[in-house]
Amino acid sequence: MTAKDNTGTKRPLIILTGPTAVGKTALSIGLAKAIQGEIISADSMQVYRGMDIGTAKITKEQMDGVPHHLIDIMDPSDSFHVMAFQQKCKEAMEDIYARHKIPILVGGTGFYIQSVLYDISFTETDTDIEYRQELQKIAEEQGSYVLHARLAKIDPEAADEIHPNNVKRVIRALEFNHQTGEKISIHNEQERQRKSPYQFRYYVLSLPREILYDRINRRVDVMRRDGLVDEVKGLLQQGITPNMVSMQGLGYKEIIDALQGSCSFEEAFERIKRETRHFAKRQLTWFGREKEVCMVDKSQFGSEDEILTYMLTILKEKGIYDGSVKELL
């Protein structure tokens, strides 16, 4: 797939992101309808079928007729990673462009967004199987936090960005250092300096911390009320195991611990709230380091319609949208 059309003009791409629970969904639907766009989910967990409550997955009703891509495309037993996302996202974008629509990347997985926006080239380094197995054994026998602590010693910047539950990314960071002698955080920063092949606008939604944290706490309460425990039980009964990538997601790992008797359910839900707040903080740090982002503090607007009007105005100024989609594609 090329990021340019037949005339060599960069094709348009809109990104709408922000920390978890900031309120991306409703705004993304309004934006998609306003510009005749289609939404591609940039969420590493919403790709999994049957994982609806813990991922706060958008419902068919909430989609309100707007086409969505990369949701419910994998079984929880499958492993999903940034390279797979990049490939599937590019395929979805090509399909959207072919129908003279504008793709809108919506979600909070910053590395996934970065991989597409800057068309990052992933090259597989020679894998040290023994070293990887050693790290996996540590995670299984001593816990993911022990592995994360090791990363924090050699690359504190990477440790700040990667949640301890994300064992796969922690191992990848340790492997990168082991194989190259360099910090993966420095490598990632270099990737951020790449030029995007797209004509893009990158919106990052935000809220004052106390408001965001309250929204997170209330969202977790809703997950509990809606049956997160039963959702996790059902997945385990289907043969999904705790060490699978899908079960490392926030909310799932903690409920599994409670089901296994490591903690009470009350403690598990409090941990989910705490870890989600920490995750949101890391997300904001990541997005704050990205280039050419447009920070949108939702608390400074009177309504969602005002935010949408503001975003559309910027898109017109940027030349991404002027009311005539076909002319852009």
Image (spheres, rainbow, N blue to C red):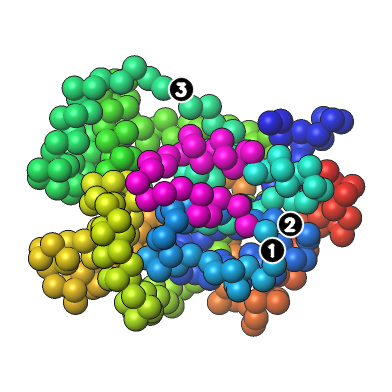
Q: Position of residue 85 (x, y in %)?
A: 51, 41
The picture quadrant where one finds residue 262 is bottom left
Image side of residue 81 versus residue 170, left or right? right
Q: Do the numbered discs 1 and 2 sit on residues whose CB atoms are within 8 Å?
A: yes
Q: Position of residue 44 (x, y in %)?
A: 44, 50
Q: Give the residues drawn in magenta, as a range.
A: 68-91
| Disc on the earlier residue, 3 or 1 | 1
Please report the residue visible at 28 percent of the width from the left and 46 percent of the height from the top.
Answer: 244
As measured in the structure, the alpha-carbon distance from the residue carrying label 1 to the one carrying label 2 is 8 Å
Q: Amino acid at mark 2?
A: Gly
Element type where label 3 sits in the image: loop
Q: Amino acid at mark 3?
A: Thr
Look at mark 3 in the image and give the residue it sits on: 123
Please report the residue visible at 54 percent of the width from the left and 31 percent of the height from the top.
Answer: 120
Element type where label 1 sits in the image: loop
Q: Residue furthest toward the top?
A: 126
Please report the residue visible at 13 percent of the width from the left and 38 percent of the height from the top.
Answer: 138
Packing grade of label 3 (10 A; few <14, some 14-19, many >=20) is few
Q: Do the numbered discs 3 and 2 sit on residues whose CB atoms are within 8 Å?
A: no
The picture quadrant where one finds residue 321 is bottom right
Q: Position of residue 175 (x, y in %)?
A: 28, 28
Badge number at residue 37: 2
Look at mark 1 in the image and give the residue it sits on: 66
Query: Eyeballing the image, is 202 above or below 190?
Result: below
